[in-house]
Amino acid sequence: MADTPVYWVTPRLGVGPFISPARAMALKIAGVTDILNVSDSRTFPETLAAGFRSVIWVPIADFVPIIEEDFISILTALDTMFLAPSPVVFVHCLAGHNRSPTAIWLYLRSLGVNAEVAQQMIEQASPKSVGGNPLLVSAETTNATIAHRLSRSSETTEELRRVVLD
């Protein structure tokens, strides 16, 4: 897709840059059902009106650790998106290089994916991305990842793993 780079980390989970109004339709055509914006800028109204099942914004500052409250919001939003029928999720920040890949890295970790494997998945899909950027991840976010995984039932975690990773 020339207008909007989507780097597919898994067949149902993509990362990339901020969605301009022109790019929203290209994402719809690509089959994206849900969008998670983790930039510090609001989503354009045109994107909200494009007919995605959900467009969620969790404002994250770049190059500072993600606070636990925001991280839990990210994990909860992604769980909700992936538990809906036939999800195809696009996670973006401004450039798609730090915040959104780190959000995906943390989510994959919450599904039990090894840190190095999650980083390789992201960086193979999008070579300019930094999965698990150490400037954004702290002991707090790592602990929240584990707590979130443990708060799910094992059946829910297995269902999410199947949907996200297969």
Image (spheres, helix red, strand yellow):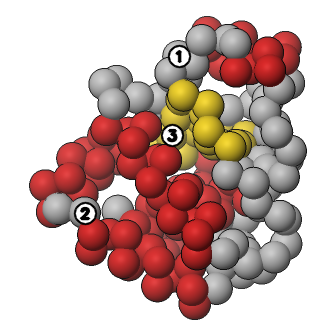
Looking at the image, tell me whether mark 2 or mark 3 is earlier in sequence order.
3
The residue tagged with tag 3: helix, strand or loop?
A: strand
**Residue at 84%, 14% in the rendered image:** 22
Residue at screen point 69% across, 72% down: 66
Residue 145 shows in the view: yes
Distance from disc 3 to disc 1, alpha carbons, whole Å, reads 11 Å
Which numbered disc covers residue 13? 3
In the current view of this chain or complex, which residue is farthest to the left?
155
Q: Quadrant of residue 150?
A: bottom left
Q: Is 159 on the left or on the right of 37, as rendered?
A: left
- Provide the residue designation for mark 1: 31
Q: At which x and y percent is residue 55?
A: 61, 31
Q: Amino acid at mark 1?
A: Gly
Q: Amino acid at mark 3?
A: Leu
Q: Nearer the viewer, residue 91 or 3?
A: 91
Q: Residue at x 85, y 65 (%)?
A: 62
**Label 3 crowding class (10 Å Cα cut-off): few <14, some 14-19, many 20+?**
many
Checking the image for residue 14, the label placed there is none
Q: What is the CA distance from the residue labelled 1 to the residue labelled 2?
A: 28 Å
- Mark 3 or mark 1, which has the lower sequence index? 3
Residue type at numbered disc 2: Arg
